[in-house]
Image: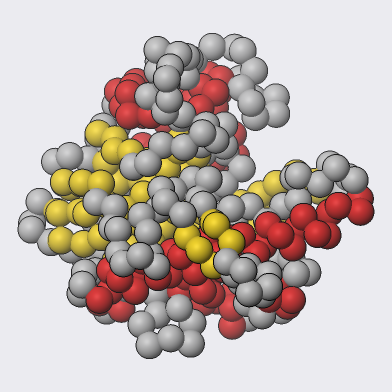
Amino acid sequence: MRLATYNVEWFNTLFDDDNRLQRDQTWSARYKVTRQAQADALGHVFAAMDADAVMVIEAPDSGSKRDTISALEDFAQVYGLRTRAAILGFANDTHQEIAMLYDPDVLTLQHTPRAGHLDIPRFDGVFSIDLDVDATKDAVRFSKPPLELSALTASGFEFHMIGVHLKSKAPHAAKSPDDIKPVAIANRRKQLAQAIWLRARIDQVLDEALPLIVMGDMNDGPGLDIFEDLFGHSSVEIVLGRGAGRQLYDPHAERALTHRFGPAPTTARFWIKTEKSYLQALLDYIMVSPDLRSLGPSWRIWHPLDDPACWADEALRQALVTASDHFPVSIDLAV
């Protein structure tokens, strides 16, 4: 079975209010990329991956006028994808949902949010934690609540998935240069709190002896900003459970954590206007529980410049660059 996670930049802008894919020469929200070019590139990438299920990060909006499931299923129909069914958890107000496109002949999925005890609320609730060590608990909310799914394969294998998009650490709310540092520190505190909340849910699922996959955009990784040392670790390390007895595993995260001064895998590529160059970062992960790791899974980052097969396929290479500023990550599991 192949599962994937894919952050699709500005996916929402490719659909009208009737949830129909717009393939025209109007500019998409991606720089100098038309809606047809981005849509066709995405169709090419999804078809090339041929995954049984794709966790779509920044999926089309769901609200009074929009419907994520209808939009994704229309996209799948246009390009003849076998991942033709979609599932959504808790909708949010950011126009960037977390949803999964999947092949219903291979997988049966159900949104199964866990309430836990009072200290671990549902992901659409409020988590209480002292963020700034002032003996007063802060109320933490997910702007994009993680998607919890119970999965059953056609062969009868049961497992659990959590799709995530943690808060960005970037100081977007800063209004002046003097605001950047305090806003960035506050954002990191909130992101770490979300990671702690997520890890508590991971422990709950592991207590139930369920095989678990956590996948998506963590907006973080070892050594990505100057404030990591201030807090002692990254949110990725918290989610993995490094130092704990029941660690999740992702080989790309492991490589980055153990070789901080060497070359690291990357899953995203952003143009930095002031520097006139690209910044590459490892932001997207597929983490598995020890029982799934024991099956000998294989991970792949579909990076157009780093993956030899992607580089050799000119059409796929161009599609990956056109489709999004993130690249898909997949895992092949013998289940």
**Residue under the point 29% across and 38% down:** 87
Residue 24 sits above or below residue 13 on the image: above
Where is residue 157 shown, x and y percent of the image?
13, 61
**Residue under the point 8% across and 58% down:** 156
Q: Can residue 165 be seen in this view?
A: no
From the viewer's perspective, tell me whether residue 179 is left or right of residue 280: right
Residue 239 sits above or below residue 325 on the image: below
35 vs 197, nearest the viewer? 197
Say how many tags the image has. 0
Residue furthest to the front in view is: 136
Residue 218 sits above or below residue 319 on the image: below
Where is residue 206 shown, x and y percent of the image?
28, 74
Q: In which quarter of the image is the N terminus?
A: bottom left
From the viewer's perspective, tell me whether residue 23 is left or right of residue 74: right
Where is residue 107 shown, x and y percent of the image?
18, 47
Q: Quadrant of the C terminus?
A: bottom left
Where is residue 238 shown, x and y percent of the image?
51, 74
Residue 113 sits above or below residue 221 on the image: above
**Residue under the point 70% across and 29% down:** 31
Q: Can residue 8 be seen in this view?
A: yes
Residue 205 image-quadrant placement: bottom left
202 vs 293, nearest the viewer? 202
From the viewer's perspective, tell me whether residue 326 is left or right of residue 225: left
**Residue under the point 21% across and 62% down:** 159
Q: Which color mode does the image show? A: secondary structure
